[in-house]
Amino acid sequence: MMQGPNFDGLAEMAAATDIPLVASGGVTTLDDVRQLVAMKMPACIVGRSLYDGAMQLEDVLAIAGDR
C-alpha cells in the first residue's frame, strides 16, 4: 500500500542539486500533490492513484496549475 512520498528525502535531494527532480513513488492523495507543489517540485508521477481512482486527473491539474 502506498503511504506517501518521502518528503524529507525529496527536500534533501532538491537542496543537493540543481537538476529538476520528479517525485515518483507513493503519491497517493491530493494532499501529497499539494505538498509537492508547495515544495516547488516540478513534476510528480500519479499513475497508480489515477488508475485506482484515488484521484482524478482534473483535480491534480487544478492543484498543479500550469507548471
Image: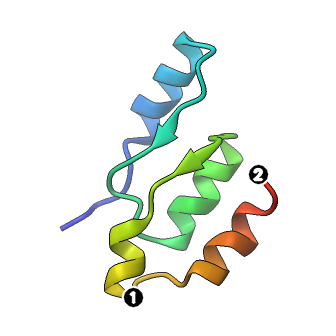
Q: Would you say 61 lies left or right of 50 here? A: right
Q: Quadrant of the N terminus?
A: bottom left
User: Looking at the image, which residue is at 37% across and 42% down?
Assistant: 6
Which residue is outermost to the left?
Answer: 1
User: Looking at the image, which residue is at 39% across and 88% down?
Assistant: 53
User: Looking at the image, which residue is at 54% across and 84% down?
Assistant: 56
Scheme of colours in the image: rainbow
Q: Position of residue 21 (x, y in %)?
A: 53, 32
Q: Position of residue 62 (x, y in %)?
A: 74, 74
Q: Would you say 61 lies left or right of 65 here? A: left
Q: Is residue 18 above or below residue 59?
A: above
Q: Position of residue 34 (x, y in %)?
A: 63, 60
Which residue is outermost to the bottom?
Answer: 53
Disc ID at residue 53 = 1
**30 or 48: which is nearer to us?**
48
User: Looking at the image, which residue is at 38% across and 74% down?
Assistant: 49
Quadrant of the rendered image containing residue 33: bottom right
The residue identified by callout 2 is 67
Quadrant of the rendered image containing residue 50: bottom left
Q: Amino acid at mark 1?
A: Gly
First in sequence: mark 1 or mark 2? 1
Q: Are marks 1 and 2 in contact (CB under 8 Å)?
A: no
- SS for dot 1: loop
Task: Give the spatial CA distance, label 1 vs label 2.
Answer: 23 Å
Q: Amino acid at mark 2?
A: Arg
**48 or 32: which is nearer to us?**
48
